[in-house]
Amino acid sequence: MKRVIAIVAFLGALIAIWQLAAASGRWSPVLLPPPAAIAEYLWNALGDGTLLDATLVTLYRLLIGYFVGIAIGLPLGLLTSTSDYFEDTIGALALGLQTLPSVCWVPLALLWFGQTESAMLFVVVMGTVWSVVLATDAGARSIPPIYARAARTMGSEGFDKWTRVILPASLPYVVSGMKQGWAFAWRSLMAAEIFVTILTGFGLGHLLHYGRELSAMDQVIGVMIVIVLIGLFADKLLFSPWERLVHRRWGTGLK
Amino acid sequence: MTAAVAHSMEVKAAPPAKLVVEGVSKWFRTPRATVHALDNINLSVAEGEFICLVGPSGCGKSTLLDIIAGLTSPDEGRVLADDQVVAGPGRHRLVMFQEPALFPWLNVLGNVMFGLKRVPDLTRKQRRAIAAYHLKLVGLEKFASSYVHELSGGMKQRVALARSLAPDPRVLLMDEPMGALDALTREQLYLDIQDIWARRRKTIILVSHNVREATCLADRVFVMSPSPGRLLDEFRIDLVRPRDINSPEVAVIASKIMAALKGRMRISPEAVE
């Protein structure tokens, strides 16, 4: 309860400062609309369905891109961890491409796929996959060798060893890698939606883009808040249970 | 643990193995030096025999155990289990390590069940029953759903013992597993091990630097010397079982073995306990 009060007080203080700044008249209301204007926009956008539709379109793209990224990144990361040869090749490639901001994939995606869903998916997957590869690789490499020895003496080799020992043993790293992958996927998708204008679906990034085109700052800030909230909820829903599981079993973390 | 389950598990107990170690030598090469770890080890272990290797730290006894397990390959010589050359690890030769090496992502029961997945033709229910039986054997049935980090060091090693016994291996290779246990737990385990061994007749090779422990448990005790590791003396122990580690008979033989061990320790006498 104390923590809830702290959170509410903190947010209240932020909004109060914002309200004061907007009311001071130093900045044009076009550039700095008051909080009430944002609330009004969000209320209207919720009412006419644009916000919900855009959110669903965006989440759909995000989930597909994210899971494709995981499906490629996880096995690739495990493979990378098996030998120095793969580390020097796939690992180095992953490291290099992870440093590339995902928005840099947009020109390539547009030329290869045109203004299509495929271009969008490509950018998200490219933004996600490399951080998942790196986290899985680091996780598998940090497993105490005694686990693998114990597994081998109990007759667990090959695929069985990978699924029942290596993968669960690297779970703490894999969870943080998947979390990082989610953050990267989210960023990539926003970049893609802002830069790839397509007719097959109007996402949150597009709302943001057209808000800028129309100088509708209430829309820009409102959509930004929605994006932050979705990120927070995803974190709580998708990753917190896994992090708690890791802490409980490994005995890590505080408390 | 019901009598019926106990009965069925004794019926399915695999026959113990005959182990032969033939001229095994091993060198460890590092960029700076080559260490001659094992020199021409010859050892024959009968079916169901309990062998103990004693020696100071660094005499290569753990390396020999790894080679018998198939976790390490020898540079010279070979190991035969039931006349088959050992080419790799297998579930018929289970190792108990110095560290418990339990898996933190599984609870205690899950750890004991791990090796049972590789035993063919067991249903999940049977695996649970066998695992629960072995947990009870080491006195930890109340901790079946605990996680590894919640156990003390001694409890972890007892779970590791249950995990090694559960898949009913033909050979049990123990690499100083009792070192981390407190004296009382250890004495209880000596009795448990003798009891299990009497009923199921596994071939057991125990590596230890505790001469009393070796005398209490083994049919034959081998004294190893370091650098390079060699088998020097062999002691046959014919005391009736179960043996009490505190009995005078055990103490007499143990002191003889200790004298032999000390006589051989020109290189590092302080390494012997």
Image (cartoon, coloured by chain):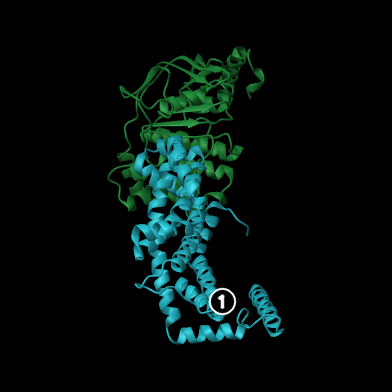
Chain colours: A cyan, B green
The quarter of the displayed image where residue B55 is located: top right
Query: Residue lying furthest left in this view?
Result: B121
Is B119 on the left-hand or right-hand side of B271? left
**Is residue A145 shown to the viewer in this render?**
yes
The subunit letter for the residue under badge 1 reads A
In the rendered image of this protein, does residue B48 appear above or below residue A252?
A: above
Q: Quadrant of the C terminus of chain A?
A: bottom right
Residue at figure coordinates x 53%, y 44% from the top left: B156
Residue A23 placement, left or right of B207: right
Residue at (58%, 27%) from the top-left corner? B210
Q: Is residue A186 above or below residue A82?
A: below
Image mark count:
1
Q: Which of A15 and B202 is in front in this view?
A: A15
Tell me the residue at 43%/18% (across/down).
Answer: B75
* Residue topped by disc 1: A221
The foreground one among A162 and B90 is A162
Q: Give the crowd class for mark 1: few <14, some 14-19, many >=20 residues within 10 Å.
A: many
Between B5 and A39, the residue placed more toward the observer is A39
Badge 1 marks a residue whose secondary structure is helix
Q: Percent position (x, y) of residue B177? A: 52, 34
Q: Quadrant of residue A162?
A: top left
Q: In this view, does A129 lie above or below B96?
A: below
Return the x and y of residue B162 as percentages of the image width and height: 45, 42
Would residue B124 be found to the left or right of residue B232 on screen?
left
Relative height, residue A166 to residue A85 (above, below): below
Q: What residue type is labelled 1?
A: Ile
Residue B48 drawn at (x, y percent): 38, 27
- On the image, the x and y values in percent for residue A142 come to 52, 42
Whether residue B233 is visible here, answered yes or no, is no
Quadrant of residue A1 within the rendered picture? bottom right
Q: Residue at 51% x, 65% y: name it.
A: A235
